[in-house]
Amino acid sequence: MIRIDSPTIYISFASEALADAKRLLRDYSSKFSRKDFIQPQLMTLAGMHQRFRLKWRELEDLVTEMPRLRQVLGLKKSPDFSTVPKFLKRLPARVLDRFFGSGKCNLLGIDASGFSSTVASPHYEKRCGKKRPYLKGSIAVDLGSLRIQAVKARRSHAHDSRDFWPLAKKCEFNVVVADKGYDDEKIHRKVHKAGADAIIPVRDRERKRVNGRHRKRLAEGFDKKTYHQRSKVETVFSVVKRKLGEDVRSRSTNMQKKELKVKLWAYNVDRRVILDSLHRLLRRC
């Protein structure tokens, strides 16, 4: 990593993202690659595209006009505006899952939120009479550090509980909290079998009888102070949507899912940059 005095937010983000990408990606996807750029460089640019809410041509102009940025990334020339999207298109979706997870956490929170899959205004869509599609993103968050540990994206309409275990099994945790939408005895059994505990309130129903050993225990009472830490997951969604945008601009569903994962990875990188800056500031005081 190249050290530069008084780095800008672009330099700080690029340095942190490049170090992360080099740890998780090979330099080239194939021995027959042209070798103009390495994969970590292109992944870093994809993260900058999301973090700074740039268009692809604007990203190309940024790299062209910032020699310090090219120096940090090790670029001999600026990539064409279509180079990074083509890289993401051929990158397997499972590879992006490696960019999440940072060891065992004590308290894990799981929730879901929708991301708009169109940039058309709601007024225009109302006039056209079209239903606005959206992409549902489910995340598992370390509630101690507010870092995203796992991501699941889907376009199909499905109950939130379907995505609980695919997220939870990718993480190491002691306690997991979620809202009533994830109330299911099967979820409790899987979490208990993994050696952890789940705090999920029982849904209110007309039928007063509660089935399941774990659900009965939670219906009688649980640690509300720990459960209310779950609201931090909504805070993460709020930060992502306000700072990085609440829409995905790709056309195909496959690319929309990749774009969402890159967006959430960019949030993790940006959070590390902010915390590192605060720690340096505190050491100077």
Image (cartoon, helix red, strand yellow):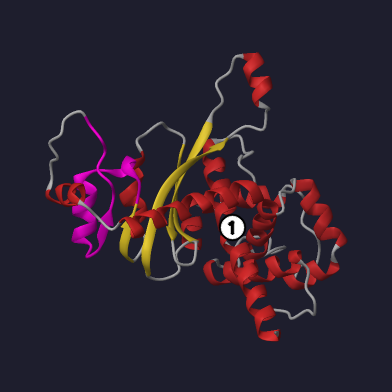
**Quarter of the figure that contains the N terminus:** bottom right
Residue at image point 17% right, 49% down: 220
Q: Secondary structure at mark 1?
A: helix
Q: Residues within 10 Å of mark 1 (few under 14, many from 20)?
A: many
**Residue 25 against residue 283 in the figure, above or below:** above
Q: Is residue 30 visible?
A: no
Look at mark 1 in the image and give the residue it sits on: 267
Residue flagged by tag 1: what amino acid is it? Answer: Tyr
Would you identify the image quadrant in which residue 255 lies? top right
Would you identify the image quadrant in which residue 68 lies? bottom right
Is 214 situated left or right of 268 in this image?
left
Q: Is residue 54 visible?
A: yes
Residue at image point 23% right, 32% down: 205
Is 167 situated left or right of 93 in this image?
left
Residue 156: x percent and y percent? 42, 32
Q: Residue furthest bottom?
A: 284
Residue 174: x percent and y percent? 30, 66
Across the whole image, how many numbered discs are drawn on residues? 1
Q: Is residue 240 magenta?
A: no
Residue 115: x percent and y percent? 55, 39
Is 193 situated left or right of 132 in this image?
left
Residue at image point 61% right, 71% down: 275
Residue 188: x percent and y percent? 22, 52
First to last magenta residue range: 178-205
Residue at image point 70% right, 66% down: 14
Q: Is residue 192 magenta?
A: yes
**Quarter of the figure that contains the C terminus:** bottom right
